[in-house]
Amino acid sequence: MGNKPGGEWVVCGQWLRVVTAEHLVIYCTPTTIAKMFEEASEVFDNMFKSSFPLTFIVFIPAVLILVSPLPAEAAHEFTVYRMQQYDLQGQPYGTRNAILNTEARTVEAEVLSRRCVIMRLADFSYDKYQKALRQSAGAVVIILPKNMSAMPQDIVQQFMELEPEMLAMETIVPVYFAEEDDELLSIYTQTLTSSSSQGSLSAAEVLLHTATANGFQMVTSGAQSKAISDWAITSLEGRLTGVGGEDLPTIVVVAHYDTFGVAPWLSYGADSNGSGVSMLLELARLFSKLYTYKRTHAAYNLLFFVSGGGKFNYQGTKRWLEDNLDHTDSSLLQDNVAFVLCLDTLGNGDSLYLHVSKPPKEGTPQYSLLKELETVVASQHPEVKFSMVHKKINLADDMLAWEHERFGIRRLPAFTLSHLPSHRSAQRSSIMDVRSVSPSSRHGAGEPPAGPHVDVSKLSRNAKVVAEALARVIYNLTEKVQEEHLSAVVDWLTAQPRAAQLVDKDSSIVSTLEYHLGRYLKDVKRHYVKADKRDPEFVFYDQLKQTMNAYRVKPAIFDLLLALCIAAYLGMMYLAIQNFGLLYSVVRRITQPKAKVH
């Protein structure tokens, strides 16, 4: 007698008595049971042989339905800002692609081809960036800290120097920037752990690790970028008309308001050139008060010009000069221009440089301004170093060095005042040029934030220097600069990106600047410049800001291994069913117990 789960069986001669768990007694012979299994084997065998294709078709969908994963949910959704894409003088710059749908990796991984390479700004280097491009990465996402002004100085300086190199070469790899948050940092950490661990494993271990690890699929929501047609760059002018005659000399004060950096939506341009625009508005306010009273109404015309497209070879200034010198018979620029003073990057530093294309001759109004600047700095601000920098205009260069060169080409006496000694300074075109945070919240006493920023006290000092020098040229008067007004304008300008691709003619930036100019000046006008349709000097592209989703997924190799396992399972089941009789006899021979005969 033997025991079976749920009952017992007893062999008595030729009869087999089966007692079930429910105490039901069944008598049958072993021959009968064998015939039952053989008949079942023949039925299954004939069924699957005759209808194998149909059965296989039924099995596969059933298995796939059972093993198919649930729809993926986004592990994190965040905003990304695409690198610059534009054409200037027919030359393309920046990234030429905007679509991203690929698996995340860090630069430590061995294989980056068709992968989204994630790296933090603190670990960024040009070599790592080039590695991703050489291996034809699917995309590059650079994670920026929440507060860039709190970054170490060496990292900020290194990245500022790399921005022009990143833009100098055209690439088809989409390059995005994202601001750091806890979820994005967690995705980076998990991806870094997965990428770094593969370097010390064997091939089999790498395959197993790749198949079992969790990954992230990075997907953007936008479409492919395309050129923006009929984009208008807007510039503004206003004037204060002098008294005392018809042929009065004209002093022109110019500052460009647009910004530039490796990513347009991150280009706030605090020092370059929010400081210059703030100073221009303050000068307009001061001299509008002087021109209100008959006693101080000078015999000079003052023309203020806030130009657009300054970061794109001063397109707004170029068109303004063409409109005033070539397309009209009456313009202040055609008559008696004393000099043109361009204000650029004046919000920091203890130096002031007057950049000129041709040194001014003694006895001219521009020479008078130079001497007055030297006098004011030496007598009232001895801590400031003032000097003149002479650089000839190189028409062979793709980009002009300073805005005054646009006027110099048209033979108008002009210069640019800046605290930078050279136009090649990296901070003139960097996303690191942001408004600094308060020293009490981020920095110790007396410790300046890293990177370019605006020190309102120094901006106010520089504005006083310029205002008094201009007042001394026009008449021997001085006016008080309001530091609070300068600070408010800088705060407003740096609260929003002002890249030329983002500021259209209906922008609130343009309308607000127009309003402030209208408060102090007369005849405030708008000037527009559009690229020529046949031979455009500049072309802008859209899709500069998108939403990116990071989906938690298994890697592609997991799907391949799963498919192989399913195929192996189905193959084994098919062979087992096709040879059911043989399989049954083998199993029966192995598992048949030895009967105990009484």
Image (cartoon, rainbow, N blue to C red):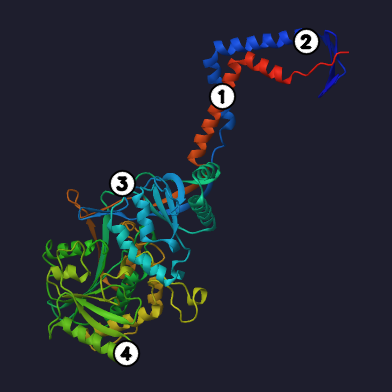
Residue 102, quarter of the rendered image? top left
Identified at 46% across, 72% down, the residue is: 437
The three-letter amino acid code for the residue at tag 2 is: Pro
**Secondary structure found at label 2:** helix
Q: Earlier in the sequence, mark 2 or mark 1?
A: 2
Q: Which residue is label 3 attached to?
A: 226
Q: Position of residue 598 (x, y in %)?
A: 89, 13
Give the Cα distance between marks 3 and 4: 53 Å
Identified at 54% across, 34% down, the residue is: 562
Q: Position of residue 173 (x, y in %)?
A: 35, 49
* Marks 4, 1: nearer the viewer: 1
The three-letter amino acid code for the residue at tag 3 is: Lys
Q: Which residue is label 1 attached to?
A: 570
Q: Earlier in the sequence, mark 1 or mark 3?
A: 3
Q: Which residue is label 2 attached to?
A: 30
* Marks 2, 4: nearer the viewer: 2
Residue toward you, 228 or 391: 391
Above or below residue 410? Residue 184 is above
Identified at 44% across, 71% down, the residue is: 152
Q: Are marks 3 and 4 in contact (CB under 8 Å)?
A: no
Q: Which residue is label 4 attached to?
A: 382
Q: Are marks 1 and 3 in contact (CB under 8 Å)?
A: no
Residue 394, quarter of the rendered image? bottom left
